[in-house]
């Protein structure tokens, strides 16, 4: 059995590596061709462009994993089927399930690797944009006259926010209290500045009032006030739409909460956050779905294998897009929207496996 497993895996990895290396290269060539005029107009150096695409390799590899795993699995099984190698193994008492078990195990391993890569890709994407000098952190971001709802009942009334500089002009921070043990307060200041080292804001030139009881007020004047609870970052206060491809799962979750406190609709981002978990497991599920199809016919050769892979991929993408639209509009829950295509293909794959002659 070890000899058979090694043979199956050797066939699989040979095709997988070609796809994982080749697909990102194709994506890069297409993107470079499309953006070359813009790069030349911006007088970008060849080194900057090269660094930009090198940092994008993890992203393109992540995108290539499902189709690469599917192509490798389908080509491996269809080739063995055409050459009667699966029939020979069955004649020797080895079931189809046992033959493809190594491929399913590798499919799950690829899914785990892809899951880890989803946390690497956002940082790489940011560095990719850094190479072109066009990160969001370098863009001017301002917000004027808004109310931001913080945690633990705090509200921030801000006249002007300059997020890029980490500065606020005219701010009032207020919190509703619950008696003497948890008094309400408000703090007003002419300006505030973000202390990145301590992760908090410093309010300057203002006054602080405590309300320990209904008819009692304690007031102080201050030149500087360190707000331990005021830890929302400038970008969180700005709460503008941000590319989810530049944020990991946890970071995107924090950003969504900031947007919700600003009253924004976050349905689409909630779906994207859940997709960061659902997408990696597509590798295993789509392999599970494709294996029985590849074993269904001894005719067609490479063209049939490519047809199966492309058809499966297109159908899967259609389901993902439909589910995304439904989740973004609130028709179904974001978790359901993100995992719906995986669930359908998983059930379909298991049903197809039950129909395979072992």
Image (tube, grey):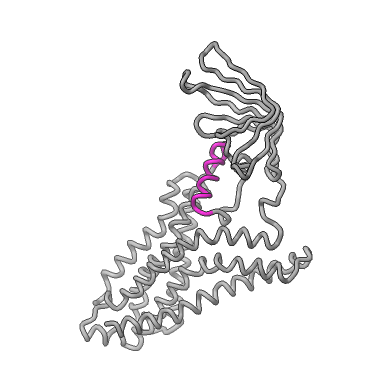
Q: Nearer the viewer, residue 142 or 299?
A: 142
Residue sticking out furthest to the left? 93
Residue 343 lies within the magenta run: no
Where residue 267 appears, as percent x and y from the top left, is 51, 45
Q: Residue at x 65, y 40 (%)?
A: 194
Where residue 218 appears, as percent x and y from the top left, is 58, 16
Where residue 290 appears, as percent x and y from the top left, is 38, 71
Q: In this rendering, would 40 be left or right of 110?
A: right
Where residue 304 appears, as percent x and y from the top left, is 43, 80
Q: Please determine whether, in this image, residue 260 is positioned above or below residue 55.
A: above
Q: Please determine whether, in this image, residue 85 is positioned above or below residue 189.
A: below
Residue 260 lies within the magenta run: yes
Q: Please determine whether, in this image, residue 20 is positioned above or below residue 319.
A: below
Q: Image quadrant of residue 263?
A: top right
Q: Residue at x 63, y 71 (%)?
A: 30
Q: Image quadrant of residue 209?
A: top right
Q: Residue at x 32, y 81 (%)?
A: 5
Q: Which portion, as a residue range, is magenta?
A: 248-265
Residue sticking out furthest to the top? 215
Q: Which quarter shows the C terminus?
A: bottom left
Q: Which quarter shows the N terminus?
A: bottom left
Give the main secondary structure, helix, strand or loop, of the magenta stretch.
helix
């Amino acid at each position: 059995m070890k000899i058979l497993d090694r043979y199956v895996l050797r066939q699989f990895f040979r095709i997988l590596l070609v796809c994982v290396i080749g697909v990102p290269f194709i994506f890069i060539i297409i993107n470079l061709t499309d953006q070359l005029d813009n790069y030349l107009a911006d007088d970008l150096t060849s080194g900057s462009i090269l660094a930009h695409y090198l940092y994008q390799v993890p992203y393109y590899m992540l995108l290539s994993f499902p189709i690469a795993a599917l192509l490798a699995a389908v080509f491996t099984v269809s080739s063995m089927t055409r050459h009667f190698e699966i029939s020979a193994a069955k004649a020797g008492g080895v079931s189809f399930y046992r033959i493809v078990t190594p491929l399913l195990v590798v499919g799950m391993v690829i899914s785990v690797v892809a899951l880890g890569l989803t946390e690497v890709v956002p940082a790489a994407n940011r560095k990719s944009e850094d190479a072109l000098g066009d990160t969001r952190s370098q863009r001017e971001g301002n917000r004027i006259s808004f109310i931001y709802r913080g945690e633990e009942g705090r509200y921030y009334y801000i006249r002007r926010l300059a997020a890029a500089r980490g500065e606020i002009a005219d701010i009032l921070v207020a919190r509703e209290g619950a008696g003497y043990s948890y008094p309400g307060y408000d703090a007003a200041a002419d300006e505030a500045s973000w202390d990145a080292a301590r992760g908090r804001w410093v309010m300057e030139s203002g006054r602080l009032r405590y309300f320990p009881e209904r008819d009692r007020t304690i007031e102080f004047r201050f030149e500087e006030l360190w707000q331990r609870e005021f830890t929302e970052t400038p970008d969180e206060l700005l709460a503008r739409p941000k590319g989810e491809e530049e944020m990991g799962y946890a970071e995107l979750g924090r950003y969504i909460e900031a947007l919700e406190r600003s009253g924004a609709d976050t349905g689409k981002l909630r779906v994207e956050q859940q997709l960061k978990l659902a997408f990696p497991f597509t590798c295993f599920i789509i392999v599970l779905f494709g294996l029985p199809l590849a074993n269904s016919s001894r005719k067609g050769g490479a063209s049939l294998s490519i047809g199966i892979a492309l058809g499966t991929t297109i159908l899967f993408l259609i389901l993902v897009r439909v589910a995304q639209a439904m989740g973004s509009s609130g028709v179904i829950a974001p978790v359901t929207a993100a995992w719906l295509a995986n669930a359908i293909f998983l059930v379909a794959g298991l049903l197809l496996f039950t129909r395979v002659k072992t």
